[in-house]
């Protein structure tokens, strides 16, 4: 069993190596063919299909084809122009000028202008978009000297690299003429999106499917190649795997299949299963500590907990080897910021026990030191597994853990609204730049109730200051150094522990060509995809 | 006229229980931690406090629970089921989009289960303690003991993945233009596996009930009388025994109408049918109170209707009940 997994791993890494080879070598062999229908599986229905106010991968996987952003990530992970043709930051970092592409029209025929950019930035991103409200907090105005120029004016320096990297997800544009003067939350275009993308929205049958068809007036001439895309809602994971196997769907992204099925389909020659095309969306299994508990306020106890859990074993045996031990809060795939290094608290049960003794929590007569309440946020199949694994690992060092099983909404409310937990576990998703998604987990002062922010009762003035400084540092080299310092401080204090580092797995039919060729491919526009 | 007063009386009895059910479900969902905005945030992957406040206002969950309940009941009196948080449109529209699928699934499964149950039950009772009876009873027990989701998944593995005879899921083919008949055929084709899966559990119950009640009725005096006066065996079975043995089965079918809605959740999930069961599940997960209450309301009405129909059938089968009904 062990042996076969090892050979499997070897073949997977060989496949990964093949992916590193220049794309051109293979691309030259075949020319794109037009036509065909691509069917994609979706695990959950979204309330709103408007990426300008809902930034999440499950919205992008549909709307990314219909609605476009100012920029996207290219094959090598660099920022490439989409609706913006070029951009420039002022030397003081307080304004950024975007030049829009010429001759782009919305699906309803109206032209795209800088007024659209202004409306989206000021009225949608800044007011309604998750993460956008934070990113654009210091955005004062968007000036539109002409139809093709939009100048973003900030009251605090905005690092250009941060803005661009964030805008890949948070820079989607919907038409101003449809939204202006309405409540954006219940605008009918939210479920019948109109954009500038390669595919036009056709139909949304609730609970069943969404259909989009080829946009004949797309600004990239002769693209897209695929005639239609149909997204089918298949919530049951086994049913989704069956649909892949019968060929009813050809693509399932963002771990919508069970880990066991992904592992099984990996051996099936009809599918390519892997993490390629997801490099921009790394995520972690986390352990959150409630610092209001006196035991957990002691850094020695937090370190002891990290020492007590064998993360490598968990990855190998529960995650089918998909992932690695995280070395800190910034994932290794984030080339611009990853400082390297190793995680300072490797699995060492003896050391854990020694640290707990040193902190003054000796084992009692029953062998227990103290009891903790663990709340898993069950938005993925591996979270309850990790919860149980934490429970059993900590029992070994004398910490009793009660796991509180709640559904998603319940767990979020319990942890972030009521602070009624000692330990929590779930996912942290990295969104291109630490300032977008990651530092909020450590910065104090987040209002009660905001999920996936520091509601853990942790406060370090030094760290707060560092976080603020890094968010407005416009020199990329200095920024990188500041984040290296940030990683060092977090690893020292361990206010929250990012235990694993993983990438989403995509299962695709081998019929798909030009698939997974960018680091956020499932969310991207698929303009060059063919069957 | 008699029928109408009977119907009205039944409805009057049902109203208080309907109210209790609605208030109970409302209370249960209030006890569950997290509201519809928490569920939305879980789906979105976060948001800041000001945005969350805006969303709470938008979904009307920033008022106290009892005001929300009072509002709901007042609206219900006006036959307004409210607005769905997940779907952003009136709950009535959402439910009536989904209702046909569930009704079709329930009706076809109940028909299959009761017909199959009657036929197999009669055969088993005619060949009692012989190999036919043993075979039918064993299979019945087996289906009864197997969970629906497992049966469904196994059916998919065998008939869709291995053999490729039937579709693995969905209500109809997407994006294909059919004539009305073609569409009906396509839907029927997609409903084969879900119908069989859902009906197997009930079929097992029905065949056991039929077998037992056939055996019981066949020992009664009037059967002996019929035999004594020389009625042929087929007539005895169909006209005398079967008609009387059907009574307990009809009762059970009425009771099962509610249970089937529960079973439909599982079958609809496994076969990705856009029905009420899945909608109910989704509403709980998303804490969409209006939709859930709407489904409960409609389902309760449905169960009341089915039971009313059962009472009528009952009276048709057994004249003695007709007498008491007046």
Image (cartoon, grey):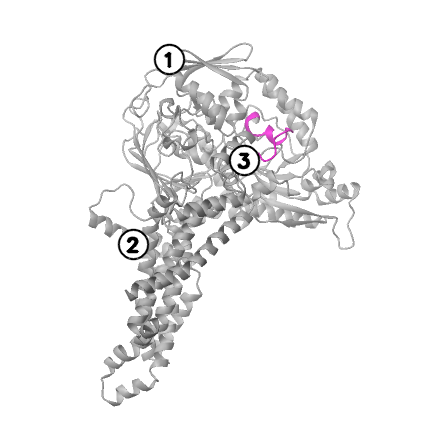
Q: Which residue is mark 3?
A: A283
Chain letter for the residue marked with disc 2 in the picture = B
Q: Which residue is painted at 61% across and 17% down in the image?
A: A478
Majority secondary structure of magenta residues = loop
- 10 Å neighbourhood of mark 3: few (<14), some, or many (≥20)? many
C-alpha span from label 2 to label 3: 40 Å
Q: Earlier in the sequence, mark 1 or mark 3?
A: 1
| Residue A104 sits in quarter | top left
**In the image, which residues are magenta?**
A435-451
| Residue A143 found in image quarter | top left
Left-right relation of B271 to B177 = right
Q: Is residue A261 located in the magenta-colored stretch of the structure?
A: no
Q: At x 70% / y 25%, what residue is drawn?
A: A461
Residue sitting at x 66%, y 39%: A289
The CA distance from mark 1 to mark 2 is 57 Å
Judge whether residue A76 can be spotted in this image. Answer: no
């Amino acid at each position: 069993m062990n042996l076969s997994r090892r050979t499997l791993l070897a073949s997977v890494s060989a496949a990964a190596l093949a992916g590193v080879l220049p794309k051109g070598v293979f691309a030259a062999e075949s020319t794109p063919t037009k036509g065909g229908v691509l069917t994609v599986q979706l695990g959950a229905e979204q309330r709103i299909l408007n990426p300008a106010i809902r930034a999440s991968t499950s919205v992008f996987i549909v709307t990314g084809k219909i609605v476009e952003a100012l920029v996207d990530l290219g094959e090598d992970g660099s920022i490439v122009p989409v609706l913006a043709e070029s951009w420039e930051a002022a030397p003081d970092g307080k304004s950024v000028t975007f030049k829009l592409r010429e001759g782009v029209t919305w699906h309803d025929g109206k032209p795209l202008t800088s007024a659209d950019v202004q409306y989206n930035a000021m009225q949608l991103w800044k007011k309604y978009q998750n993460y956008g409200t934070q990113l654009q907090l210091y955005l004062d105005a968007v000036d539109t000297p002409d139809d093709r120029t939009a100048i973003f004016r900030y009251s605090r320096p905005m690092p250009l690299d941060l803005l661009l990297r964030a805008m890949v997800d948070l820079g989607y544009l919907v038409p101003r003429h449809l939204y202006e003067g309405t409540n954006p939350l219940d605008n009918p275009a939210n479920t019948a999106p109109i954009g500038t993308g390669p595919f036009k929205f056709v139909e949304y049958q609730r609970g069943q499917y969404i259909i989009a068809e080829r946009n004949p007036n797309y600004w990239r001439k002769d693209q897209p190649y695929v005639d239609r895309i149909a997204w089918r809602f298949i919530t049951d994971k086994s049913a989704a795997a069956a649909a892949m196997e019968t060929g009813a769907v050809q693509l399932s992204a963002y771990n919508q299949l069970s880990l066991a099925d992904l592992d099984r389909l990996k051996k099936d020659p009809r599918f390519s299963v892997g993490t390629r095309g997801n490099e921009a969306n790394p995520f972690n299994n986390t352990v959150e500590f409630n610092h209001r508990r006196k035991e957990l306020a002691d850094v020695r106890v937090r370190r002891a907990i990290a020492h007590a859990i064998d993360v490598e074993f968990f990855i190998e045996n529960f995650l089918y080897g998909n992932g690695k031990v995280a070395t800190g809060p910034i994932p290794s795939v984030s080339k611009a910021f990853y400082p390297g290094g190793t995680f300072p608290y490797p699995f060492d049960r003896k050391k854990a026990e020694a640290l707990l003794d040193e902190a003054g929590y000796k084992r009692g007569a029953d062998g227990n030191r103290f009891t903790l309440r663990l709340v898993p946020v069950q938005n993925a199949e591996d979270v309850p597994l990790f919860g149980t694994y934490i429970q059993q690992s900590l029992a070994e060092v004398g910490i009793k853990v009660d796991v509180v099983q709640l559904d998603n909404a319940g767990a979020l409310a319990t942890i972030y609204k009521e602070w009624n937990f000692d330990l929590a576990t779930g996912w942290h998703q990295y969104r291109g730049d630490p300032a977008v998604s990651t530092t909020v987990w450590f910065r104090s002062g987040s209002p009660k109730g905001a999920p996936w922010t520091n509601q853990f009762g942790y406060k370090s003035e030094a760290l707060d200051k560092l976080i603020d400084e890094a968010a407005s540092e416009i020199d990329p080299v200095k920024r990188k150094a500041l984040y290296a310092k940030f990683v060092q401080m977090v690893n020292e204090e361990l206010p929250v522990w990012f235990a694993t580092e993983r990438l989403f797995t995509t299962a695709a039919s081998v019929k798909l060509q030009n698939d997974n060729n960018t680091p956020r491919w499932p969310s991207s526009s698929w303009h060059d995809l063919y069957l | 006229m008699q029928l109408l007063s009977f119907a009205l009386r039944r409805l009057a009895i049902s109203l208080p229980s309907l109210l209790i059910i609605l208030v109970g479900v409302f209370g249960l969902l209030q006890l569950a931690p997290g509201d519809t905005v928490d569920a939305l945030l879980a789906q979105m992957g976060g948001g800041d406090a000001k945005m969350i406040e805006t969303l709470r206002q938008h979904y009307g969950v920033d008022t106290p629970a009892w005001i929300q309940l009072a509002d709901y009941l007042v609206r219900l009196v006006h036959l307004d089921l409210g607005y769905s948080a997940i779907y952003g449109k009136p709950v009535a529209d959402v439910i009536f989009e989904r209702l046909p699928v569930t009704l079709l699934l329930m009706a076809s499964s109940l028909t299959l289960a009761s017909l199959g149950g009657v036929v197999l039950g009669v055969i088993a009772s005619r060949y009692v303690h012989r190999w036919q009876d043993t075979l039918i009873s064993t299979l019945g027990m087996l289906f009864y003991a197997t969970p629906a989701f497992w049966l469904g998944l196994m059916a998919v593995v065998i008939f869709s993945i291995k053999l490729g005879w039937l579709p693995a899921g969905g209500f109809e083919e997407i994006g294909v233009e059919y004539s009305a008949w073609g569409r009906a055929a396509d839907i029927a084709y997609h409903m084969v596996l879900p119908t069989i899966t859902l009906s197997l559990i009930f079929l097992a119950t029905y065949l056991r009930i039929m077998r037992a009640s056939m055996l019981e009725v066949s020992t009664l005096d009037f059967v002996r009388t019929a035999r004594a006066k020389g009625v042929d065996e087929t007539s005895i079975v169909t006209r005398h025994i079967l008609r009387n043995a059907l009574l307990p089965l009809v009762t059970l079918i009425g009771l099962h109408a509610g249970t089937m809605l529960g079973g439909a959740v599982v079958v609809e999930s496994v076969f990705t049918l856009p029905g009420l069961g899945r909608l109910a599940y989704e509403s709980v997960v998303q804490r969409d109170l209006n939709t859930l209450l709407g489904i409960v309301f409609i389902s309760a009405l449905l169960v009341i209707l089915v039971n009313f129909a059962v009472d009528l059938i009952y009276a048709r089968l057994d004249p003695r009940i007709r007498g008491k009904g007046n």
